[in-house]
Amino acid sequence: MNRDTPTNEIQEPGKPGQRLLVAMAPGQISEPLVRWTQSLARSLGCAWDAVYVETASNLSEEDQLQVSGTLALARALGAEVITVSDPDFVRGLLRTALERKATQIVIGKKADASYWSLFRSDKWLARLLRESRELDIHVVRFLEESPAKVSPFPAQPYGSTWREYLIAVGIILAAAWVLIHIKSLIGYHGVAWIFLAVVVIMASFVGRGATLLAALLSALLWDYLFTEPLYSFTIAGGEDQILFVVYMVVAVVLGQLTTRIRRQERAERERKDRAEALQRLTREVTEAAEFDGMVDRAARQTAAVFKAPVALLLPSSTGLLSLHPAGTFQVPETERALAAWVYEHRQPAGRFTVQFPTASALYLPLAAYGDNWGVLGLQLNESFPPTIHQRNLLEAFAEQIGLAIHRHQMHQISEKSKVLAESERLSKTLLNSISHEVRTPLAAIQSATAFMVEAQKPELSDSQKAMMAEIQEATERLNRLVGRVLDITRLESGHVKPKIEPCEVTDLVQMAEDQTRKELAQHKVTIEIAPDLPPVAMDFELMLHSLANLLSNAAFHTPPGTEVQLVAKMEDGALLLIVADGGPGIPSECLPHLFEKFYRAPAARTGGTGLGLSIVKGFVEAQGGRVTAENRATGGAAFAIRLPLQQTAASVVETNSSAMSPTEKEPG
């Protein structure tokens, strides 16, 4: 196949915002034209559309197969396929180009050297070039390697089949035979009107060509059999000559108008049927409350409209496609890979397509909002591909089913989110209420046990003293737990408002050691504070809580006698607080989860809550800092708090001012 140079070159092939539109029509070598357009679009790096303009003329079965196959090829090559209805091919094409914001139109022209081509006209091409305005037009000529013989007698001349021509001739001859017998009753003028009525009625069920033949044959028969001189094509009187001409014009015009109205009515009826089918599908899948019910209704509607077994393959939790029981045919094992290919590439494949045409079924992706929600399989019984309208309707069905699955999935996610949010809210409220209610009796227990230990009245035995010590220790432990629950609740509710002000790092370290001295009593504690540390802007209480928590954590998770180091120094413009130990370290798989709420390492000692490190992370990040954990090369774990020193005295004042409530701020 050779290609001649386009007759209208692009003036600026590299200009931005390009979009190609290739026009397809029956018998216009559309397949090579589509491939040529794809190559041009690829070289320009732009999108392209394949447009088929449906005119009023009827298509033969061969032409329908050709157009359907070409549209499928264009879709497989990456084009967006569009079909429009317009009796005027040029007008429909230019309107579509304007709507799609196309900058270039590609038209195919087959080089034909046969004698019959001399009678063909390219008036529509000249009109397209004249009315295209700013659009660039490519006219691409193709030469077939083995040109088929072009018959001067097309299979469907002028939109009518040979059967319709025979019907038209038979009806006119039958009408002439009847009118010969009643001519004396109605006169030859009445015969003309009856012939005209027969032609108009015939135009309602035969094509344009058959209607024109009926008009011409009836006029000739009227002249030959009913006007003077009889059995001659000569018309004697001037009035009869005018009547003959008027009859011909009226018959042709009325026949044409009736045929056009009938075709438009048929096209409108087909569009209405397609719209109603799509509306029924939408209503069915929308009314279904359960997912399986929705899929079942979609399968039944699709099978009823296309009169073919249907299969729906949906992704499982593992991501693999599984056949839904609502389907009416079993996908062969040999075609499961084909369905997976359709799901992955989001392109139709299978029977009557370019991809895997030997398959037993046609498979389409259920795509919606940029995602693919499954695959629709249709086992068509016909031996020829679906028509353009059937293919468009089938793709609309697939898209609508994809939208329905998407809506159902989003609804489920929304419902789960609502349940989780409500559960989280109730749990926070419950924890907050319980924590506050528990603190009151805890304070009473602490006061009572402290008074009994100090008063020693009545005198306590050694076992009683041990029991009182256990009560005090358990009470303190429970008090810490309640405090941590309150802290995590404050963090999650956003009520933690750091009060940033310059603080001495030495005081911070000393107080953290004092608070954890009892817990670290059986450990060797080493403190290293860099000399001349400047005051650092921080929330002292939050930072003290965080540092003490890290020290307690080191004491809790390391055996007695283990060394615990606390280092405070400046590094890269930030305060660095390091709590390191010489214990067993942290399992590598646990490191990413250490600061998650309620997370505890599998081998951790019993008694922890999994909240301490989460609170440390929240308090440090609330001040603009960062906390990390890692295993030391020499053994053990190291936790580091890094607090940047970006706040000057002025910014500290500003931060404190912004943290105050409106009633706390001083008037301007």
Image (cartoon, rainbow, N blue to C red):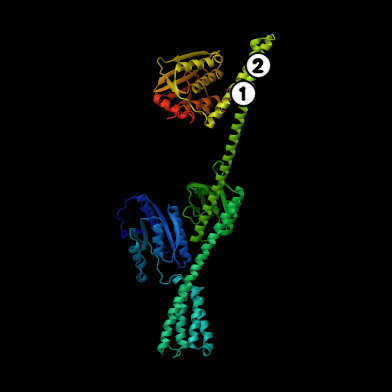
The amino acid pointed to by label 1 is Arg
* Residue closer to the observer: 620 or 226: 620
* 10 Å crowding of disc 2: few (<14), some (14-19), many (20+): few
In the picture, which quadrant includes the C terminus?
top left
**Residue 608 appears left or right of 623:** right
* Total labels drawn: 2
In the displayed orientation, state which residue is furthest to the left.
11
Numbered label attached to residue 439 = 1
The percent coordinates of residue 319 (x first, y second) are 54, 42
Q: Position of residue 564 (x, y in %)?
A: 50, 16
Query: Pointer 2 and pointer 1: residues touching (CB < 8 Å)?
Result: no
Note whether residue 233 is visible. Answer: no
Residue 523 showing in the rendered view: yes
Locate residue 6, reporting x and y percent.
32, 59
Disc marking residue 6: none
Which amino acid type corresponds to the residue marked 2 in the rendered image?
A: Ala
**Could you tell me which residue is drawn at 54 percent across and 62 percent down?**
273
User: Callout 2: helix, strand or loop?
Assistant: helix
Residue 397 shown left or right of residue 667 in the figure? right
Q: Reply above or below: 218 against 647.
A: below
At x 65%, y 16%, the residue is 448
Q: Look at the picture and state if 626 lies above or below 253.
A: above
User: Left or right: where does residue 190 sit relative to residue 426?
Assistant: left
Q: Position of residue 287 (x, y in %)?
A: 60, 52
- To which residue does mark 2 refer? 448
Q: Which quarter of the rendered picture does the N terminus lie within?
A: bottom left
Q: Quadrant of residue 454?
A: top right
- 515 on left or right of 2: right
* Neighbour tally class for label 1: few under 14, some 14-19, many 20 plus, Cα within 10 Å: some
The one of 438 and 641 positioned closer to us in this rendering: 438
Per the image, label 1 sits on a secondary structure element best described as helix
| Label 2 or label 1, whichever comes before in sequence order | 1
